Amino acid sequence: MLTEKDVYERLNEVFRDVFDDDGICVGAETTAADIEDWDSLEHIRLIAAVEQEFSIRFKMGEVASMKNVGEMATIILSRISNA
């Protein structure tokens, strides 16, 4: 069973890979404003990488409404626990 801590550990790896920055450490309150290169193009790459990492697909409405990494983690946990 995947825990919230596991999700954040895996998200950190994805963020570090997508943004090519080993210093990134995301938390629930992390937003695009907190990561220098996080623009609309990188957001698409990030969503695709997260979907691949967790073997899920976000709905378009979910992607549009995500305000921070915590909301992303909540969606991931709900998808995995319902799988």
Image (cartoon, rainbow, N blue to C red):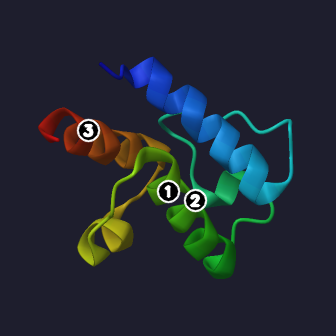
In screen coordinates, is 48 left or right of 32?
A: left
Disc 1 secondary structure class? helix
Label 2 crowding class (10 Å Cα cut-off): few <14, some 14-19, many 20+? some
The amino acid beneath tag 3 is Ile
Identify the residue at image location x=68%, y=48%.
15
CB contact under 8 Å: marks 1 and 3: no
Tell me where residue 7 appears, x and y as whole percent. 46, 31
Circle on res. 52: 1
Question: Marks 1 and 2, Cα distance to the nearest angstrom?
Answer: 5 Å
Question: Marks 1 and 3, Cα distance to the nearest angstrom?
Answer: 13 Å
Quadrant housing the C terminus:
top left
Relative height, residue 76 to residue 48 (above, below):
above
CB contact under 8 Å: marks 1 and 2: yes
Earlier along the polypeptide chain: callout 1 or callout 3? 1
Circle on res. 49: 2
Identify the residue at image location x=45%, y=58%.
51
Circle on res. 80: 3
